[in-house]
Image (spheres, grey):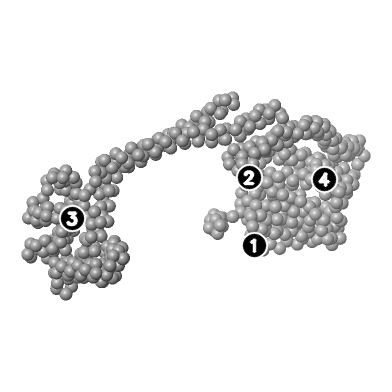
Amino acid sequence: MKDSLRNSIRHRIMLIFVGLMTAVLFLVWAINNWWLEKYYIDEKRKEMEAAYSEIDRTVLEKTGDGASVGTVIAEELQRELDTWSRLEASGPEREADFREQEEAGSDKGEKTGGEEGQRTLLGLIRGYGEKNNINMVLIDSNTGATVLGSGRDSDYLVQKVQRYVLGITAKRANTLKKHENYVIETNYDSRSRSSYMESWGFLSDNRTLFIMSMPLASIRESVMLANRFTTCVGLAALIFGSVLMYFVTNQVTKPLLRLAALSERMSELDFDVKYEGSSRDEIGVLGRSMNTLSDKLKETIGALKQANQQLQHDIEEKIQIDEMRKEFIANVSHELKTPIALIQGYAEGLSEGMCEDRESRDYYCEVIMDEAGKMNKMVKQLLTLSALEFGSDMPVMERFDVHELIGELLSSAGILIEQKEARIIFEPDGPLYVEADEFKIEEVMTNYLNNAMNHLSGERVIRIWTERFKDQTVVRVYNSGEAIPQEDIPNLWTKFYKVDKARTRAYGGSGIGLSIVKAIMDAHHQSCGVRNVEGGVEFWITLKVWRSGAELCENEGAK
């Protein structure tokens, strides 16, 4: 596996490197072969345009007072002769200094010596001839006389420009750019078997004809030389790079091999071995990730041991559930035992004629019906609770006004409230729409109200109010009376749990009502609770506030 890993990675890296280097070499060769000639000619054309612009501007400056180009050049030549004559008389050291200044001034198109710092037309033309290898001829179009000829082929250039003016163009001429006063083109000279770039036309004084000629080296030969040089350098770089990549990949594969050995140790459940590299690259990240994986596996195996303990705990819990089931059956039996005994006793009394008067018979019948009603109520509650716990009676979500529901509940329970001598405080401040199962929430509020009335004492006050928050509302039911022992509060929601069994029996409670409340609120994914407050006990539930589409859109926009 190690050999295959090392060979595979090295093979891929070497292939990628050689492929990239080959692609770069081919791209450079293609660019040189296809675009170098065009680029070379375009740069020469720009040099020719720059030469025309500067020479033309200088001619306009020098001939501004009506002088001709020939006169300007003759004056500059005469000044040069006078300057050289004075320098020859002053000695060789002064002459050498002047030559250095003359060469520096020619590069800038300036004439030093007697007119230091002043640009001259001769200096400008000579500078382009020496720096850019441009031969130039100036002809006075009025007289046809050659004003200036630079280079060895001045006479030949004069003949060329005269033919061009007469419309006799070269057979292999190619116009590069045509301006208002001049043209730039490439021509093949059959005499010298060479290509030239030529610019000819008139200067802006409209009396001076010019031609500039620049020899073009053999572009194809230059391209071949450039490609040959690039290929040699590229092959050398490819060979050197391949050797270098061999050693570089070795540095990459070594930590990978260490990681492979680490993974083998981990496969044998040895989680104490760790990657010890400190690099910040991808390999270092992988090594640290494997260290994390090793720690996680170690923790997981430890968790499996704990899971065995948890399994034992679950078995014990199952036993407890069985015990709770038995206790549940015992509680149901106990709750039914008393009313059944009462019904049986009073029924036997009726059958044996123990109550001969009507008043006694009515009392016996009333007790039997009351106990039967309690049993019926308890059975219904058990069926309701069972349906809620097993999910077969899911809430039907709808929109309704919880304030209206509470008001109707209090109105229907008015007689019972009067019997309990309770004082109800409920002051709604308008409708409050919630999203829930109205029938089940009514059952919750009924259980809370009955629980409050059955445990009233002291001021005998029952207060119901709501508190609205962003997406929820809390419905609270308070009754004055004795506080619930703190140790009993967590068990209030357990089936058949009674804080005071004697008092619960007095009002017929079975200990199921609050369990139904808890099951209904769990089915709504909402909360319920109880707490002791000053002077009494407060029960509460939470409900989801119903929000219209406009409110939802408004809140989304605010976000």
| 547, 385: nearer the viewer | 547
Q: Position of residue 266 (x, y in %)?
A: 68, 30
Residue depth check, mark 3 versus mark 4: number of the one nearer the observer: 3
Identify the residue position indicated by label 3 in the image.
151
Identify the residue position indicated by label 4 in the image.
491
Using the image, determine if residue 61 lies above or below residue 43.
below
Q: Which residue is found at the position 49% from the left and 33% from the top?
A: 243
| Residue 135 can be seen, yes or no | yes
Q: Which residue is found at the position 15% from the left and 59% from the top?
A: 149
The amino acid sitting under disc 2 is Val
| Residue 420 can be seen, yes or no | no
Report the side of 46 relative to 67 (left or right).
right
| 512, 148: nearer the viewer | 148
Identify the residue position indicated by label 1 in the image.
430
Residue extending farthest to the right is 354
Labels 1 and 4 touching (C-beta < 8 A): no
Q: Quadrant of the C terminus?
A: bottom right
Counting residues from the N terminus, which is met first, the one under dot 3 or under dot 4? 3
Labels 2 and 3 touching (C-beta < 8 A): no
Residue depth check, mark 1 versus mark 4: number of the one nearer the observer: 4
Identify the residue position indicated by label 2 in the image.
396
Disc 2, SS: loop
Using the image, determine if residue 495 lies above or below residue 130.
above
Disc 3, SS: loop
Q: Position of residue 295 (x, y in %)?
A: 70, 37
